[in-house]
Amino acid sequence: MNLAEDIKRKAFRLGFDLIGITDVLPIDTEQAESLAEWLKSGFAGRMDYMRKNFEKRINPAKLLKNAQSVIAVGLNYRPPPIQNSKPSTGCLKAKTQNSSFGRVANYAQYEDYHLFIKKQLRKLTNFISSIAGESLKFKICVDSVPLAERALAVRAGLGFIGKNRMLINPELGPQILLGEIITNLKLEPDEPVTDNCSNCDKCIAACPTGALRNDGQFDASKCISYLTIEYKGQISSGLARKIDNWLFGCDECVLACPYQEDSPVCENKRFKFYSDRAQLNLRQILDLSQEEFKTQFTDSVIKRLGLEGLKRNAQICLANITSQKDEPAS
């Protein structure tokens, strides 16, 4: 076995579902220009961090001196389907059967993936170090580092970028969390996946706000995930109505994807899953204290939103639910 194969076998033992290797060359010119145009268009909304460190974002070699390779990993996060069909019990347990619930995006039903993937990647670098010795240099990246991780994941053979802007693996579907190790080791790169969405537009049709545009552009400023997580202001009434009862994030474009239909559920038992976070009691959220919020979501990505943001979203969801109940039957 060569080193690349040893690394891959260890990554699978650590619970990752996908692993691939690519070089540290910049993403291709067309991708870089497309990203620059997207940022210039205003489609990034108020995500100012996307505009920073642009050269680093498109060129992984700028993130580590003498970098040679990028090891890209993927973690399937599709939850058991039964958890998405019923209101939760346990965390913020409903007091009555008539309580209103808000939906939580699938990835946020697990422990904070940033911390989990970083921990597992640290174990992988420890393994690599035990073979490569003190000469090993590396940088672990999980989401928050300026890096075009989906483009690199494609190049490393993990999947392709779909019209919903998610990385899609032909076997695992679009519910994949990514992480990377940039290293000074020279490793044999993998071949990219050649699949694509072909003529399918189901995700575009499923997008409630039109964030996935018919012209192929993605207007993140209209995306429900952006509005309920990234956007800190008052959401306009027109967009708020389209949020429906999405309390945190949105999975509409993911669930509409044909690659999702037969994809397996997450098999990594070390990645802690909270079945009671699939749907949360909106009225109880409005009554939460700051201390209760910290206790309930201490190991969740939901904590990043903050209590006031979560209450804002809960009020929007309740207003939408009330409005739907008041509508006359057709």
Image (tube, rainbow, N blue to C red):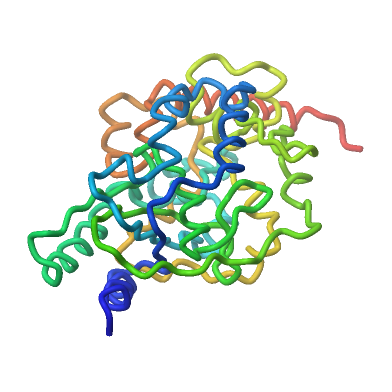
* Residue 55 image offset from top left, x and y in percent: 42, 33
Count of all numbered marks drawn on residues in the image: 0
Front-most of residues 145 and 63: 63
Front-most of residues 262 and 179: 179
Residue 73 sits in quarter: bottom left
- Quarter of the figure that contains the C terminus: top right
Give the vertical position of 172 relative to 207 (above or below): below
Apparent side of residue 325 relative to residue 101 in the rendered image (left or right): right
Front-most of residues 88 and 174: 174
Residue 217 sits in quarter: top right
Give the residue drawn at x 56%, y 64%: 169
Give the vertical position of 134 relative to 13 (above or below): above
- Quarter of the figure that contains the N terminus: bottom left
Apparent side of residue 322 relative to residue 136 in the rendered image (left or right): right
Give the residue drawn at x 50%, y 65%: 157
Give the residue drawn at x 24%, y 49%: 66
* Residue 292 image offset from top left, x and y in percent: 29, 31
* Residue 98 image offset from top left, x and y in percent: 59, 40
Q: Residue extending furthest right? A: 330
Give the residue drawn at x 79%, y 45%: 205
* Residue 296 image offset from top left, x and y in percent: 31, 39
Front-most of residues 50 and 322: 50
Give the vertical position of 158 relative to 177 (above or below): below
Q: Residue extending furthest bottom? A: 1
Apparent side of residue 165 relative to residue 8 in the rendered image (left or right): right
